[in-house]
Amino acid sequence: MFKDVVIIGAGAAGLMCAIEAGKRGRKVILVDAAHKLAEKIRISGGGRCNFTNRYARAENFLSSNPHFCRSALARFTPLDFIALVEKHGIRYHEKKLGQLFCDDSSQQIIDMLQDECQAVNVEWQISSQIGQIEYLPGNAGVQKAGHKFLLTTERNILETTSLVIATGGLSIPQIGASAFGYQVANQFNIRVTPLRPALVGLTFPTEDFAGFKDISGVAIDAEVSCRGASFRESILFTHRGLSGPAILQISSHWQPGESIHVNLLPQEDMQQILLAHKRNAMLLPNLLTHYLPKRFVQVWCSKMLGQLSIPEKPMNQYRDSELRQIAYELHNWKITPSGTVGYKKAEVTLGGVDTHELSSKTMESKRIPGLYFIGEVVDVTGQLGGFNFQWAWSSGFAAGQVV
């Protein structure tokens, strides 16, 4: 069966690509191994889908080729997707920092994309495994002259001149994530940059985190830094380590073996505050509970004062140098993660198909005519807050204009 465009992966990027290609009159089929359509959209944002971020720009993305995403983001912006949402009468709100969510349900975004696909006669082949992809090159030295792809599926053999890989990354395997897209890249000798979980919680050695696992659920507004990146949002203590928005953000920058630095009170000058209470007879933990959760203060003071070899005592018995040390640690708590909670809990996959191998304007392989990679499978990873969906829309749109 011949189709102008075969898109493997019916997630955010694949659906957008199908819509745009269909608008151009192309005969499009979406193929997906999953039993349910666009599960990652459905579960995102607590079921309300953080579908874009008003302020998305290239600086919000990580890639070995940092300028690659600029072209696609400029040609399909957050305003363009918002216009589509408003066209379908979907009510939405801004939660914080430009993050846009549906008022009701993420299913509305899925329904919207399905409706747009149906309007341009996109066909579906869901719950269908791809067995083999064969590439038949065209005339030697003639770009796009007679080449084609043959895809063997469980149901049929599909023939096309435009094959789009929109299969996502390794994150959240329980809803069907797989390495399929990277395997296709490897088949065609297209480089894949190193992969690891991103936007993910961090774990810590048991001996380093003793006591903190007992305060699971405690959250603190903090600033977390690593490798020159810094994020000010909440951190959340878990039974295995740390999570929360600031930790998820910094996880994309953290490398195994490195430390992260946590400023527990970025809005305060703790040296000034501690020295101002030097004549006070209250204990240090009692003073700190005015600024930080009591359960955290008890564990942190016990651990940190032990490390500094400073006994717990009334404020008026501390030397100035001791208070300065304590203040420094409050603003620069250095901890070394042992790892992450893995792809099962990761929101995205860092790394992917090397962008140096692709056209930034079309997402097409520079060496294999007619082969495109879009969305999370590409080495473009957004920050937390709707940026990764915007990359899916933008990259899908870019490929959809040319496939």
Image (cartoon, rainbow, N blue to C red):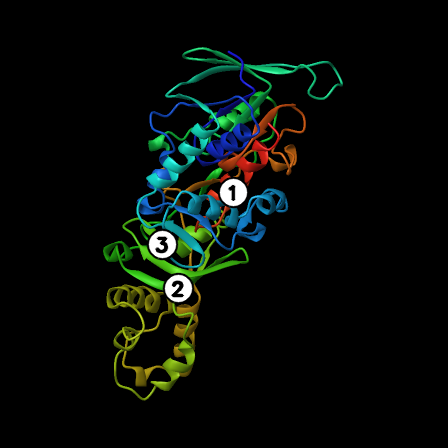
SS at circle 3:
loop
Q: Which of marks 1 and 3 is nearer the N terminus?
A: 3
Q: Residue placed at 37% from the left, 25% from the top?
A: 34
Q: Is residue 228 left or right of residue 262?
A: right
- What is the number of the mark on residue 37? none
Q: How crowded is mark 2: few (under 14 residues within 10 Å), some or many (20 or more)?
A: many
Position above or below: 29 against 111 = above
SS at circle 2:
strand
Q: Residues within 10 Å of mark 1 (few under 14, many from 20)?
A: many
Asked if labels 1 and 2 touch by Cβ distance under 8 angstroms, the answer is no
Residue 204 seen from this side: no
Residue under pointer 3: 244
Residue 220, position as x, y percentages in the image? 33, 63
Q: Nearer the viewer, mark 2 or mark 1?
A: 1
- What is the number of the mark on residue 222? 2
Residue 116 seen from this side: yes
Question: In this orientation, which residue lies closer to the viewer: 48 or 379?
Answer: 48
Asked if labels 3 and 1 touch by Cβ distance under 8 angstroms, the answer is no
Instruction: Estimate the spatial distance between the alpha carbons at disc 3 and disc 2, rounded to whole Å.
Output: 10 Å
User: Please, what is the three-letter code of the amino acid marked with disc 2?
Assistant: Ala
- What is the number of the mark on residue 391? 1
Instruction: Estimate the spatial distance between the alpha carbons at disc 1 and disc 3, rounded to whole Å.
Output: 22 Å
